[in-house]
Image (cartoon, rainbow, N blue to C red):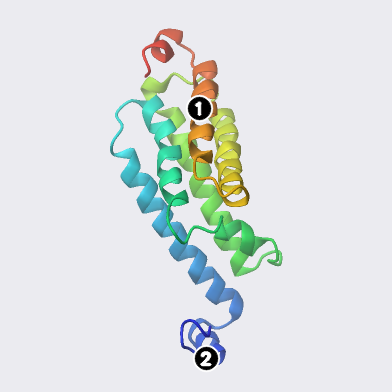
Amino acid sequence: MQKAGVAKASLYNLFGSKEELVQAYLDAGHADTRVQVERALTRFRTPRERLLGVFDGQGQLFTEPDFNGCAHMTASAEALRGSPVEGAADRYRLWVRTLFTDLAREAEAGVAAPEDLARQLHLLYDGAGVSARMDRNPSAATTARMAAASLFDATVKDKELADAGQ
C-alpha cells in the first residue's frame, strides 16, 4: 500500500474489502496472462504446435522482471472457502484447463481422450510455474513443453499425425 502511495482505508473503500482488492489484482493478472498466451498461440498453426505453444507463452511470462510465481496460487493459500480470492483462482484455473481441453479437441488433433490430456498438461503448466519461481529458472517452461510433446504424441489416435508434427 505504501508503494502505491494510497492509504489502506482508501483502497478498501474503493474495493469493498481486502478480499475484493486481491480478487481485482488476480483478475487483472489473469487477463494479462490470457493476452500473452493467446498472442503466443497466433504463431502456431497445427493443433500440436498450439498445445505446445501454451508453454511458450508461459515461458515468456517467466522472463518478465517482476515474475514472482503464480499470484493465484500464493493468494489462494490463505483464502477462505467461497471467498472472492478463491473465486478468482478458480476462474483462472478453469481458463487454463479449458484452453488445454479445447486445443486437444481440435478436430485434426486426433487426441483419444482430450480431457485426460488437458489434466496432464495442466499439471505440467502448474509445475513449470512452481519450478520457475522456486528454482528461479525461466527455462522450466521449455522442460514442460518437451514433456507435453511426449504426452501429446503418446495420446494421438493417428500416429501419422504425431509423426508429421500435427
Please name the residue shown 50% across and 91% down the image.
10
Please name the residue shown 41% across and 39% down the image.
56
Q: Nearer the viewer, mark 1 or mark 2?
A: 1
Q: Is disc 1 surrounded by few (<14), some (14 to 19) or many (20+) residues within 10 Å?
A: few
> Residue 94 in the image: x percent, y percent?
53, 48
Instruction: Name the secondary structure under disc 2.
Output: loop
Please name the residue shown 46% across and 82% down the image.
4
Is 138 in front, or is 103? 138
Q: How many marks?
A: 2
User: Residue 88, located in which quarter of the rendered image?
Assistant: bottom right
Residue 48's place in the image compared with 63, above or below, is above
Tell whether 49 sits left or right of 92. left
> Residue 21 in the image: x percent, y percent?
53, 76
> Residue 38 in the image: x percent, y percent?
35, 45
Instruction: Name the secondary structure under disc 1.
Output: helix
Q: Looking at this rendering, what residue extends furthest in the front direction?
A: 136
Q: Which corner quadrant holds the C terminus? A: top left
Q: Is disc 2 surrounded by few (<14), some (14 to 19) or many (20+) residues within 10 Å?
A: few
**Disc 1: which residue:** 146
Q: Looking at this rendering, what residue extends furthest in the top direction?
A: 160
